[in-house]
Image: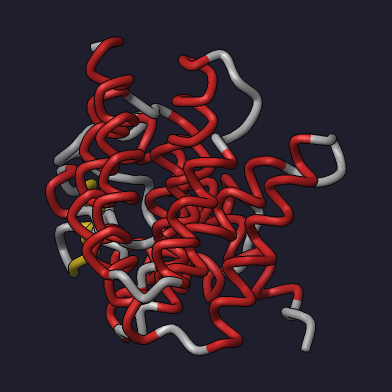
Amino acid sequence: MKPSPRQNLTHQLTYDLGIAVVKGTYPVGGGLPSEADLCVQYNVSRSSTREAVKMLSAKGLISSRPKQGIRVLPESSWNMFDTDVLTWILSSKPSLALLKEFTQVRLAIEPQAAALAAINATYEQLEDIDKALSRMVDADQGLDDPLDADIAFHTSILVASGNRFFVQLTEFIGTALRVSIRYTNKIKGVPGADVKQHADILNTIKSRNPDKARDAVTAILEEALELIDSQL
């Protein structure tokens, strides 16, 4: 089903206000315009404005209470695992420090996901990782998008881990990878990822060797951390 016009207006207002908060247009502890003023400023209905405020409150960006109005919360309250919040941050003020923290999160998750994939992956899931690797090969020939192919490879491993919590992180990981991979590739001066390194990861998973799978993923993530540290 297509979203209704009101839903579209709500999502657009949520996006506009979210970007404004992340950029610092409204200072922490300060107030946003009232719902009535937002209706006029953005030419939307009161119901759409109320829904947008609720969505931003759920994401931890603002609080809305009677007699206190709408207040901007500090970054420590933001839900960094919310893909909207992460997208707004990465699109407006990506920093090397933030990319380093994200890569540290990957280092804590993805090697173990690869080890679990070596144990748990079904034939179909191995095929999905293989297809993503083939896309990376095609991307080297200009026949696919190198970033999309790289992201597909890493998120396919999360799914193949068989761990439901890791699977839930695929959208979060994929969102942040769009910025971090592009940046580390730029530092290295290459358009795409090292296909051989990724092929090695797949081979260790296919061979059902969890220790080697863990080490192979750890190696490329530690390389990414070193590249980021070299620029800090």
Residue 132 lies left or right of residue 83; in this view the side is: right
Residue 125 x, y percent position in the rendering? 55, 81
**29, 99: nearer the viewer:** 99
In the depicted structure, whether residue 229 falls above or below residue 116? above
Which image quarter holds the C terminus?
A: top left
Left or right for 191, reference 80:
right
Question: In the rendered picture of this protein, how many numbered marks are placed on residues?
Answer: 0
Which residue is the extreme one toward the top? 231
Q: Is residue 161 left or right of residue 36?
A: left
Q: Who's the residue at 59% across and 60% down the image?
A: 152
**Image-based side of 25 in relation to 31, left or right:** right
In x, y percent, where is residue 80?
A: 27, 54
**Residue, far front:** 207
Location of residue 131 (image quadrant): bottom right
**How are the residues colored?**
secondary structure
Note whether 161 is above or below 224 in the view shown: below
Q: Depth check: give the residue in front, 116 or 38.
A: 116
Expressed as whole percent of the image width and height from the top left, the position of residue 29 reads 14, 41
Which image quadrant: the N terminus?
bottom right
Residue shown at 47% from the left, 51% from the top: 200
Image quadrant where residue 227 sits? top left
Q: Residue at x 73, y 79 (%)?
A: 3
Q: Residue furthest right?
A: 143
- The image quadrant that residue 81 belongs to is bottom left
Q: Residue at x 23, y 53 (%)?
A: 78
| 198 over 125 or under it: above or below | above
Task: Looking at the picture, tell me which residue is in the foreground, 121 or 162.
Answer: 121
